[in-house]
Amino acid sequence: MSQSAKTSDAAAARPKAVNGELKLEVVVIPVSDVDRAKDFYGGLGWRLDADFPVGDAFRVIQFTPPGSQCSIHFGKGITAAAPGSANGTYLVVSDIEAARADLVARGVDVGDVFHRAGPGKPQVKGRDPERSSYFSYATFSDPDGNSWLLQEITARLPGRVEATSTAFTSPSELAAALLRAEAAHGEHEKRTGQRDADWPAWYAEYIVQEQAGGPLPQ
């Protein structure tokens, strides 16, 4: 057994936390010009939650990306980190081409979509040809140079999502899941050679298992 497999098995065997949830709430982004950063992140279509100045020494601004349960903070007097030093913060999307197109339409300088042919291998231009989850990326930066990494994920690895929890952050994300279920169900009917009258239950099982990283129906 490989060392990575042993590590994964050991992690899976650890007891889950039972004393309450720990939810990642905020990531702090260091910026040099607060108002410039506010204009940039507002221009992305992110929700402005707060802009609280306290005298001349402190100001905190909070934005939340669409569909995210985690927000960002930036401002004055909230971090000693150098402006532009937040690198490679991940933003997960269900359709990387659509996400990139939206940012470009908003005037953001986004790099080309790329994928990796395998672990440790160089970047290859374009989306992963099989649209495998976790394999396709694009990058952009804010005016200070804080960089963001878009990553396309349509199905989570096992254990990454609670099997009893299925959620979608937008109608387009749900629609994309339904299209994938439709394509897989078409292959299912080809294998069985007959129409599946119980297709709604098949779709539901496919969508839940895909998001949880569980075994897909055949």
Image (spheres, grey):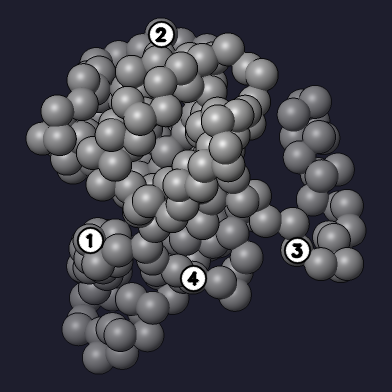
Mark toward the start of the polypeptide (1 vs 2): 2
Label 4 or label 2, whichever lies nearer to me, is: 4
Q: Amino acid at mark 2?
A: Pro
Residue occupying image coordinates x 51% and y 33%? 74
Mark toward the start of the polypeptide (2 vs 3): 3
Label 1 or label 3, whichever lies nearer to me, is: 3
Above or below, 80 relative to 1: above
Above or below, 177 relative to 104: below
Residue occupying image coordinates x 40% and y 15%? 144
Q: Which residue is mark 2?
A: 122
Residue occupying image coordinates x 62% and y 65%? 162
Above or below, 79 relative to 14: above
Q: CA distance from mark 1 to mark 2?
A: 31 Å
Q: Amino acid at mark 3?
A: Glu
Q: Amino acid at mark 1?
A: Ser
Q: Amino acid at mark 4?
A: Thr
Q: How many C-alpha atoms fall within 10 Å of the one at disc 3: few (<14), some, or many (≥20)?
A: few
Label of residue 166 in the image: 4
Q: Nearer the viewer, residue 154 or 57?
A: 57
Q: Which residue is mark 3?
A: 21
Left or right of 92, for residue 185:
left
Q: CA distance from mark 1 to mark 4?
A: 15 Å
Task: Please provide percent x and percent y for residue 97.
Answer: 20, 37
Label of residue 47 in the image: none
Q: Which residue is mark 1?
A: 172
